[in-house]
Amino acid sequence: MMRWTAALTGSTSGTLRLWDLTGRDEEPLVSPEGHAASVTCVSVDWESKRAVTGSADRALRSWDLDELECIGTLQGHDGWIWSVDVDWQGGSGAVSASDDRTLRLWSMSAFCLLPAAVLRQVEADTDQASSDATCVQCEKSMAVQGGWAMHVVVNWNLQQALCACSNRTLELWDLQTGSQVAVLSGHASAVKCVGADWGRRQALSGSSDGAIKLWNLRTAECLLTLDGHAEPVRCLAFDPKSQRALSGSEDCLLKLWDTTSGQCIVTLNGHADSIECMRVDWAGQTVISGSRDGELKVWSLSLRTCTSTFQHATGVASCDAGYLCRDV
């Protein structure tokens, strides 16, 4: 099992920072250029050293992590982009969610966004990188019925997308037909984040009402409500294997939950402002969290404590973590 060695964060000022979690490099690599507004979402393929980001500036950008350089810009949304899910392994595409009330399905014909194995072959054949953003095109636009599209998770094998919506619902979409499959209702306020156990056909959602709900995707029924946060839930992670979930909230707290009983197992306290993003390595029992307080924190779930803190100049709006093999 490989431990996380790096984290990529997007800031409220529009820049990206690549952090060395091992402690060898004290200062992060900062993008020479960035988005024109807050970087609201980040998705990374650590093997190919490529990333995709979305922003309040309405653009998606693709990045080369070796130099943290932008290699493509994707336009099409008319509002803030809140979330992006990229099929790094299969190369099926990417789905973005925006407050223009749409989900957009993008092709990945630009080789900078292809799976690592294909990318290596293309690089061997061409020995150069393409920066032509026009070869990444929007294949389909789906009009969300539930207001703003706040967060999206995709099962690329099933070709289904689950979207968290601002009008208190979740919407399940078929990517092949572009049609809505189901609507899940029950939250008292806007749904901010969602995670899915596609094997069991279950989903977990977090809302501005502070509640987390467990859903049956087959019947659209709410199975369980997890109460404990005093403010909106901004991010969550769901581990079907252990039946655990982790949530981050505007109340500055991380909470670990048992999704079978609905009980909070532990509360992690350390941020001074809203927790905007997080990633969890369930096998390694490691968490990173980013906050408006400008801090990126690394936590040990087994020790139930923060093990290291990295300071941003501005708030942390999005993050991802993984094993980055550095060239020597």
Image (tube, rainbow, N blue to C red):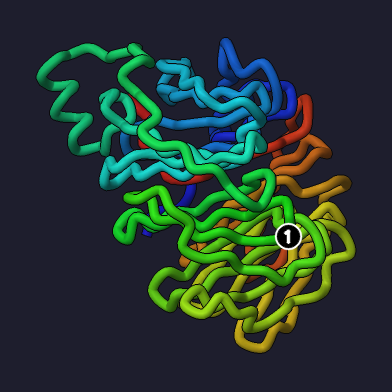
* The quadrant where residue 112 appears: top left
Q: Quadrant of the C terminus?
A: top left
Any part of residue 21 in sight: no
Which x, y percent locates residue 243? 54, 79
The amino acid marked with disc number 1 is Arg
Badge 1: how crowded within 10 Å, few (<14), some, or many (20+)?
A: many
Which x, y percent locates residue 186? 72, 71
Which residue, given by chain and number where applicable, does mark 1 sit on? 168
Horizontal side, residue 174 vs residue 142: left or right = left
**From the viewer's perspective, is residue 94 above or below residue 153?**
above
Residue 201 or residue 239, whichever sits in front:
201
- Residue furthest bottom as drawn: 261
**From the viewer's perspective, is residue 68 above or below residue 142?**
above
Residue 149 or residue 1, whichever sits in front:
149
Residue at horizontal 80%, vertical 57%? 208
Any part of residue 87 in sight: yes
